[in-house]
Image (cartoon, grey):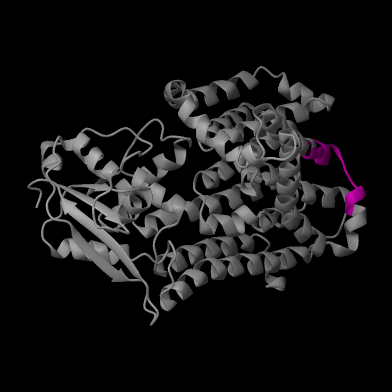
């Protein structure tokens, strides 16, 4: 592999593609229920809307479109995520090639993104909207470097496209282009790019992309900001010190933990040259370094301004994604020989990525075989089989919560699933849907439908005439110490 990469460094694209294909195959072959983000995507794939609650809609639109084309399945959910991750890596490498002269070093930066915990671990365990926003980060870097190096109208249009798509992916993405604009100011040559008339084209492209969702956002801004601020203020009511100190400490810790893995990867690969690399710099390291620092300062100001006390590492991924290119630019400035380093970085990334696949999916398989309870071992497939055996399925299911609705939608993709308190408006129901309704809930003790489920079903149909409740107990996994999962369901009126 070392010789192959030395002769043909672009082989790294094939290796990355093979890894993401492997990730798809393993997830599709693995038994078990969906993760939290995936079950949400399964549920929301039923609707095409301008907004879906606290998250921007781009990932939901992509998942909806893919489900319409090839159907909703574990494959369609897993394929979208890994295809976007692959696109992120490829675009990142292309962006690196704009400012990094040595092809091997550019590819080292590309492989270096796999050292980011959100990429090699969290994205295989969960995450959705963040993944498509990473693609926008890579596209923005490509456009940004292109504008700074050889400005043309295409570069500015790509920057606008990246900004629009990025904000449609995650709202906090807006910090990245804002930081890029400020980072250009100290350099006179770069500053001229900022005051180029073509900047207006970039903003126009972004505005056109964002306009439909912004129309929705004006009427739903409280829904968007409320839950996010609540997460960031987690634990504030029990604080024993000033909130801004807690916010600063939490941000510092999250930044350190998120930055440490890629920094450690580059330090290990270039272990003999760490001091020379640390001292080296040029205008490219300066502008990217400023971008990163400004991004973190923006987050700090937001946290202090809102009284936030909690910051998670994964929320910083758009900013720490700048680090592999930054470190590679430092290596370039130091004039370090990188001839054999691509193979070393590839080997390190392979250990991290394959290890993460084993940890994420191997743990689920082990719990399944041992009959251990977890969110991934709940046998929704057996419940779906039971319902199918009873005769023609209802066209409308009212579930007790998101997890049940999302996982059962995956098992019964032709039915419509709703639940009380869902983050989207109730769709218009046909007479047939209202006539054939099944209420579904889990862990019944006693086996009576929760009051909020009954009330929601009555609101939908105008009827509260339930048939006799059926309870269905099924063991978890295949182990001898299996626990039982209890489900219950009842038809509404004459829905049977």
Q: In this view, does 440 lie to the left or right of 152?
A: left
Residue 478 in picture, x, y percent from top left: 36, 78
Placement of 142 over or under 298, stated as above or below: below
Residue at (15, 34) in percent of width and height: 462
Magenta stretch secondary structure, dominant: helix
Residue 475 in picture, x, y percent from top left: 32, 72
Q: Does the rendering let one see residue 395?
A: yes
Placement of 371 over or under 103, stated as above or below: below
Residue 350 in picture, x, y percent from top left: 64, 67
Q: Between 135 and 392, which is closer to the camera in this rendering?
A: 392
Q: Is residue 108 magenta?
A: no
Q: Quadrant of residue 459?
A: top left
Q: Residue furthest bottom?
A: 480
Q: Is residue 347 left or right of residue 478?
A: right
Residue at (62, 26) in percent of width and height: 153
Q: Is residue 417 left or right of residue 308?
A: left
The quarter in which the N terminus is drawn is bottom right
Residue 30 in picture, x, y percent from top left: 42, 69
Please provide the residue range marked out in magenta.
Answer: 277-289
């Amino acid at each position: 592999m070392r010789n192959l990469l030395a002769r043909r460094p672009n082989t790294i694209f094939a290796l990355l593609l093979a890894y993401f294909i492997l990730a798809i195959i393993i997830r599709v072959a693995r038994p078990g229920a969906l993760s939290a983000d995936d079950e949400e995507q399964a549920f929301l794939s039923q609707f095409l809307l301008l907004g879906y609650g606290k998250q921007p809609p781009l990932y939901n639109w992509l998942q909806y479109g893919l489900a319409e084309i090839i159907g909703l399945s574990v494959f369609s959910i897993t394929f979208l995520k890994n295809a976007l991750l692959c696109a992120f890596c490829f675009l990142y490498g292309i962006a690196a090639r704009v400012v990094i002269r040595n092809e091997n070093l550019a590819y080292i930066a590309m492989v270096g993104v796999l050292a980011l915990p959100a990429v090699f671990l969290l994205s295989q365990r969960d995450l959705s909207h963040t993944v498509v926003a990473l693609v926008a980060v890579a596209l923005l870097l490509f456009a940004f470097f292109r504008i700074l190096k050889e400005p043309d109208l295409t570069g500015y249009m790509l920057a606008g496209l990246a900004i629009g798509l990025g904000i449609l992916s995650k709202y906090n993405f807006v910090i990245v282009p804002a930081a890029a604009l400020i980072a250009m100011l100290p350099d006179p040559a770069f500053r001229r790019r900022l005051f180029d008339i073509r900047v207006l084209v970039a903003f126009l492209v972004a505005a056109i992309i964002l306009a439909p969702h912004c129309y929705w956002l004006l009427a739903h801004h409280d829904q968007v900001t409320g839950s996010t601020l609540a997460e960031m203020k987690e634990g504030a009511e029990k604080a024993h010190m000033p909130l801004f100190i807690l916010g600063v400490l939490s941000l510092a810790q999250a930044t350190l933990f998120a930055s440490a893995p890629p920094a450690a990867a580059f330090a290990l690969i270039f272990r003999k040259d760490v001091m020379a690399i640390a001292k080296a710099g040029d205008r490219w390291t300066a502008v990217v370094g400023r971008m990163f620092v400004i991004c973190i300062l923006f987050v700090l100001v937001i946290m202090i301004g809102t009284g936030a006390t909690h910051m998670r590492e994964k929320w910083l991924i758009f900013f720490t994604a700048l680090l592999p290119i930054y470190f590679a630019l430092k290596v370039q400035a130091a004039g370090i020989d990188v001839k054999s380093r691509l193979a070393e970085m590839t080997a390190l990334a392979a250990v991290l990525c394959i290890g993460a696949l084993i940890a994420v999916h191997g743990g689920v398989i082990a719990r399944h075989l041992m009959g251990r309870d977890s969110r991934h071992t709940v046998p929704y497939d057996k419940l779906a089989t039971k319902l199918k055996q009873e005769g023609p399925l209802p066209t409308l299911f009212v579930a007790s919560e998101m997890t049940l609705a999302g996982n059962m939608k995956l098992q019964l993709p032709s039915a419509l699933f709703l639940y009380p308190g869902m983050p989207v408006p109730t769709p218009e129901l046909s007479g047939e849907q209202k006539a054939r309704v099944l209420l579904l809930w889990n862990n019944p003790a006693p086996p009576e439908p929760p009051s909020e489920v009954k009330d929601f079903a009555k609101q939908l149909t105008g009827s509260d005439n339930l048939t006799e409740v059926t309870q269905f107990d099924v063991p978890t996994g295949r182990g001898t110490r299996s626990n039982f999962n209890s489900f219950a369901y009842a038809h509404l009126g004459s829905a049977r």
